[in-house]
Image: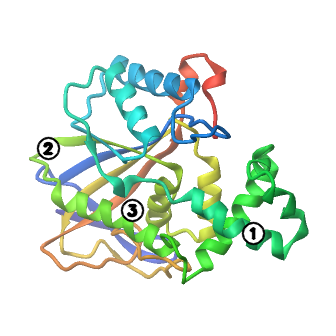
Amino acid sequence: MTFYSCLEYGGLYKIPILDKAQSMSHLFLIRHGQASFGAQNYDQLSQIGYSQAQTLGRYYQKQSVHFDQIIHGSLTRQQQTAQNMAEAMKFEGALSQDPALNEFDSENLLKYYLPQLAAQDKQFKPLLNDEWAWSSSEYSFEIVLRALMDLWQADLNCPFESWIDFQARVLGFLNAFSHSTQDVGEITKKIALVTSGGCISVILQSILKLDNDALLDINLSINNASVSEIRRWATPTQPLLDGAFSKSPLSAGPLSTSIGPKETSANNKTAFKLLNFNNISPLLESGLNHLITRK
């Protein structure tokens, strides 16, 4: 591999020029379609959600995008999104499932931390009688979600999956998956990961070295059935950069990325690069504005 150096972000970076033998994968991080927000069973696609997944699949079929693999979490809304997308794009392979791609436990997040919010600030007390009232507007949704996330991220004794454990689960999956995926020669594998906004945000936080406030900004920006793309390549053990970044608070540790500290314990290591974020072009091209949703 050939390297060239550039001065950026206050440090000297050794950027790899990929040779033909480089092992690469193109990962499509797909958020599930709209779920049944406010319904008795949230974990089902709404009719809009089904349309979003099918529209995405038809777009990929039209663009001749062929996935080598489609992996989804075990949540129903993630499975339904993957299945409807795969059918619409005429995907011929078998879908794979991994619960590591599941969203954080939002049900317990509400049940456990909402009473704490109400005890701290009387403006949250009405939510104890109607837990969905906080979603009545984008403003109230963001205010309450930020407050809940702050409590969860700071709680080192969380009785359910903690913030740190959630980060570790998501990043652990991606690192393990990346090291188990073998590409051949110049072939770049295209792999779809159908997951949720929290998981996508954690991955991008690690790649871009963002703090938790910025992570929540990302999370609130991710549309249903949107696509964020990252490129992964396996590299020799020679460091990709000289420089240092501090970890974000309460971080489970960064992925090996193209702009951050590297840790390597094997002959190869993995670098990640963000290609695009929250792409909703497939939905926009359909001309159906009602398909553009975030919750």
Q: Quadrant of the C terminus?
A: top right
* Residue that mark 2 sits on: 186
CA gap between label 2 and label 3 equals 28 Å
Q: Nearer the viewer, residue 246 or 157?
A: 157
Residue drawn at point x = 37 percent, y = 24 percent: 60
Q: Position of residue 231 (x, y in %)?
A: 33, 51
Which comes before the other along the chain, label 1 or label 2? Answer: 1
Which comes before the other along the chain, label 1 or label 3? Answer: 1
Identify residue type, mark 2: Glu
- Nearer the observer, disc 1 or disc 2? 1
Q: Position of residue 162 (x, y in %)?
A: 50, 73
Q: Nearer the viewer, residue 45 or 215?
A: 45
Lateral position of residue 250 relative to residue 295, left or right = left
Lateral position of residue 180 relative to residue 107, left or right = left
- Quarter-wise, where is residue 62 in the image? top left
Q: Residues within 10 Å of mark 2 (few under 14, many from 20)?
A: few
* Residue that mark 3 sits on: 170
What secondary structure is marked by label 3? Answer: helix
Q: Position of residue 59 (x, y in %)?
A: 42, 21
- Nearer the observer, disc 2 or disc 3? 3
* Residue that mark 1 sits on: 115
Residue drawn at point x = 31 percent, y = 61 percent: 173
What secondary structure is marked by label 2? Answer: loop
For the question of whether residue 74 can be seen, the reply is yes
